[in-house]
């Protein structure tokens, strides 16, 4: 299961050409993950393959196409977690790493740490031979324009527009060995300052995986951190005995709006059950269920395996 961010996504807000491009890239990301899993590969490799494809797409706020900070840089965050072992890796504030999810994986596999940030993380990338690029690579005209718009509105003290916040990407997967994994990657929030880091690299908030449950989130990161969204959903199942749907819906459709936050998650259990609740008007999402059925969706009105009205 994959996501490409949640937010104020209405049919008239995107052209049909962009919409087709988004759907095609979601579908390609699903195929990239599926290719790994159907060849007997691990869920960790599958989530990395899917997330990398979305990082490389200009349509999403991660890797190429990330949003800009107040100062006009790109500062990306990512994390990954393996359910059975709870191995995890996270990175924050990256400016030159082409695929932040690759570096998060490397932190997990090839360092004694769980989280690396900023210059140190970039040095670790250089030492481990992870591809780095000129920051110009990340720039898309749309995101640059978005920063100018938000900065102009800021001067008039208007609130940050909801559509300016989202576009994070993520994946969760279950492999033939019964192992769950989750991965998430983002440029964060447009116009962010002061080294702001959101929920994406905070394990237990934007990304979480344990033996019976895996979650990748998108939304207003500060609220996802305060609720410990990923960990909360999985704890409701492990300790509270709740089913996946009940646990994920309670956190995203009740706890999150009660606190004032918005966004959504993709969540999976160890039987391959899927849940993808969001409390915004849309969430870019895609899934391949255990029975092989497959789909991508954007708007709230579109059917997905949740079967919610
Ligand atoms: N959760 C991300 C953040 O707060 C934003 C998003 O999901 O688009 O950094």
Image (cartoon, rainbow, N blue to C red):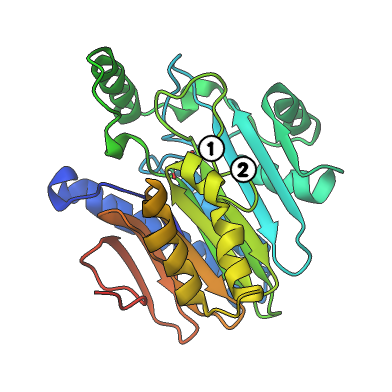
What residue appears at the point 58 percent right and 83 percent down from the top-left corner?
271
Q: Is residue 196 left or right of residue 218?
A: right
Residue 24 vs 147, above or below: the answer is below
Picture coordinates of residue 130 (x, y %)?
A: 70, 37
Picture coordinates of residue 273 (x, y %)?
A: 50, 80
What residue appears at the point 45 percent right and 50 percent down from the top-left corner?
218
Residue 276 vs 146, above or below: the answer is below
Quarter of the figure with residue 232: bottom right
Q: Is residue 36 left or right of residue 121?
A: left
The residue identified by callout 2 is 201
The response on whether ligand 1 sits within 8 Å of label 1 is yes
The response on whether ligand 1 sits within 8 Å of label 2 is no
Q: Taking the image as drawn, is residue 168 in sight?
A: yes
What residue appears at the point 36 percent right and 75 percent down from the top-left corner?
306
Picture coordinates of residue 281 (x, y %)?
A: 25, 54
Quarter of the figure with residue 86: bottom right
Q: Residue furthest front?
A: 258
User: Which element type, helix, strand or loop, lies under badge 1?
Assistant: loop
Quarter of the figure with residue 154: top left
Q: CA distance from mark 1 to mark 2?
A: 7 Å
Q: Are marks 1 and 2 in contact (CB under 8 Å)?
A: yes
Picture coordinates of residue 31 (x, y %)?
A: 47, 66
Q: Is residue 12 left or right of residue 78?
A: left
Q: Residue furthest right?
A: 112
The residue identified by callout 1 is 198
Q: Taking the image as drawn, is residue 36 in sight?
A: no
- Label 2, residues with CA under 10 Å away: few <14, some 14-19, many ≥20: many
Depth order, front residue of 179/238: 238
- Label 1, residues with CA under 10 Å away: few <14, some 14-19, many ≥20: many
Q: Which mark is residue 163?
A: none
User: Which element type, helix, strand or loop, lies under badge 2?
Assistant: loop
Residue 280 vs 116, above or below: the answer is below
């Amino acid at each position: 299961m994959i996501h490409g961010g949640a937010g104020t996504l209405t049919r008239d807000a995107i052209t049909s050409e962009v919409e087709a491009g988004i759907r095609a890239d979601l579908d390609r990301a699903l195929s990239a993950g599926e290719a790994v899993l159907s060849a007997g590969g691990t869920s960790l490799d599958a989530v990395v393959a899917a997330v990398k494809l979305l990082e490389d797409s200009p349509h999403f706020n991660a890797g190429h196409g990330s949003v800009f900070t107040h100062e006009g840089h790109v500062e990306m965050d990512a994390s990954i977690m393996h359910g059975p072992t709870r191995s995890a890796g996270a990175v924050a504030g990256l400016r030159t790493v082409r695929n932040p999810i690759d570096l998060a994986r490397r932190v997990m596999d090839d360092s004694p740490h769980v989280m690396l940030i900023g210059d140190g993380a970039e040095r670790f990338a250089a030492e481990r031979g992870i591809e780095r690029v000129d920051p110009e690579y990340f720039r898309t005209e749309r995101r640059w324009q978005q920063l100018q718009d938000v900065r102009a509105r800021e001067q008039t003290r208007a609130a940050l527009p909801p559509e300016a916040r989202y576009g994070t990407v993520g994946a969760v997967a279950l492999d033939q060995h019964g192992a769950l994994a989750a991965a998430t990657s983002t440029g964060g929030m447009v116009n962010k300052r002061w080294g702001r880091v959101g929920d994406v690299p905070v394990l237990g908030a934007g990304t979480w995986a344990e033996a019976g449950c895996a979650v990748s989130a998108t939304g207003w990161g500060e609220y996802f951190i305060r609720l410990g969204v990923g960990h909360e959903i999985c704890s409701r199942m492990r300790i509270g005995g709740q089913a996946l749907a009940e646990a994920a819906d309670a956190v995203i459709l009740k706890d999150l709006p009660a606190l004032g936050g918005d966004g959504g998650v993709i969540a999976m259990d160890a039987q391959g059950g899927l849940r993808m609740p969001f409390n915004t008007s849309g969430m870019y999402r895609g899934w391949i269920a255990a029975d092989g059925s497959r789909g991508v969706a954007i708007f709230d009105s579109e059917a997905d395996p949740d079967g919610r009205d």
